Image: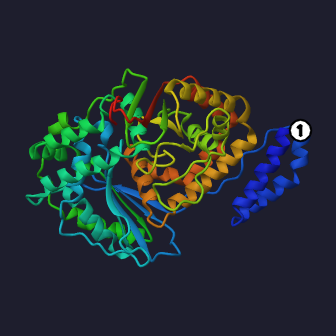
Amino acid sequence: MADCDATAAGANLAMNRRANSMKSLVFAALAVATGAASCVAASPAPSPDLDPVFAGDVRTFTDASGLRVVLAAAPPNESVAARAFVGVYTPYGTDREVTPGLAHFSEHLYSNTPSGLDDHRYPDGMENFDSNAMTRPDYISVWSTVSADAAVQRALGRSGALWSRAAPDDLFARQQQRVIDELGRSIGSQSYAARRAVDHLFYANKPSFAVEVDNTRAFAAEEIDRHLDATYAPSTSVLVIAGEIDLDAVEADLRAKLDARPKRSRPTSAEVGAWVDAPRMRGEARTREVGSPDFEGVWFAAGFAAPPRASDDYIAMIVLDQLLLGGRGEYDELWNIERALDSPLGRRLATRLAISTLDDGRGYSSASPPLAEGDPAQFEIHFAVADGVLSDLDAALTAALAEVYAEDLTAEALNRAKLDLVDFYQRWLADASLRPLGDHLAGLAMHDAAGPARLATLHEDIESVTLSDVRSAMKRYLLNGDRRVAVARHDPTGVLPQP
């Protein structure tokens, strides 16, 4: 009877969640009408018929300097005038830095180097909106959301320092202090401290905040210059323009202006290769505890080695993530995407622990969901409790995951997860800032020039995931996989290591 319930539930969800699609309405009506016949045959619930997560035109090209460019036509937003997202991305994030702190410091110097070409005009309805930079594990980004007619000018400004840099004399000292201040604020975030502790367990080049602060104080300007020369060049970067733009006109204008730029005179990454890549080393320890008198209770984080992008399990894990943790409904801020206590994993944990928060540890420092991330990566589960011993919390998670695997991986749950995941992607990629769209296009383009086109068929990839796929991925990576756990806890005595 469970299969019959799942069939009806999947069809009703398809009708309710996508009532604006005539194709979906027809599919859902037929599914409801034929539900009885399907139940007689006791067949599993069919996967819901999903709509594309992004239907805009996308094109890519590589200019003579080696710069990879991605252009995308995005639909308008009713609350904002015609706008365009402009971002420059380089793949040398914290996972690849030789000395911890180099990536973050270089991002500050690059993004704050004047180009003389910047155009800060924001579209109506988006005054003083997004214009910033971020250091992530797998890439560094510098972006703005501007009026659509300023897109090419802003792109030339944001990418200018890839060719030549002329930084003010005091820029190094000013940004050095800003980075130290930012690290100081990060130390105060208990959830981020827990995530950082798991990162430290997975990757040997992820030290404590204190070590990164000391490194930042010790950097010399010449050292940062060499790192910038190695990691910020046209041939190592991706430029994205996405928004309400005429693709033909923007491409023609941008190509002409990029071709007119003088040849880059700085060293290439090949000439300073020792400054480019650090080895990705797994740490030997499996557990870590950090603490602070300013923290409250205990924030637990578990990290699991995730499948590589080329694996058949990759999309299955993204769907499983939605099934396990639920949530991702309406949001107020890009960095505050909430997961659900009333999810299969949340409910199973709640029978053992009084958890107050269930989270994926991502925030907006990583793409959400992680379609566009590089390898290696980890799948994380976080939760907050008033108190608890790390081994007991880990045992509770182990038991909860086993129960989900045994009892909650149903056709109905899988169909709901698929619908919720595609619904989230559709809203996420259409965000007024267009930043999630830009990040996904850039992340996909870094791995494959044709990668951005994957967004057009992502719904089909999600639709094709079977219950067997999800069960196999969960068993391989979450029940039997490489796992590290950490806690960030209230520590009034100062006995535990600092984050």
Looking at the image, is 194 positioned above or below residue 126?
above
Quadrant housing residue 408: top right
Where the C terminus falls, by quadrant? top left
Q: Provide residue 55's location: percent of width, then percent of height.
A: 55, 61
Q: How is the image coloured?
A: rainbow
**Which is nearer the eye, 184 or 387?**
387
* Count of marks placed on residues: 1
Looking at the image, is 127 positioned above or below residue 365?
below
112 displayed left or right of 145? left
Does residue 232 appear anywhere in the picture?
A: no
23 displayed left or right of 391? right
Q: Provide residue 290's location: percent of width, then percent of height.
A: 38, 32
Q: Name the residue under label 1.
A: 41
Q: What element carries label 1?
A: loop
174 displayed left or right of 465? left
Q: How crowded is mark 1: few (under 14 residues within 10 Å), some or many (20 or more)?
A: few
Q: Provide residue 361's location: percent of width, then percent of height.
A: 47, 42
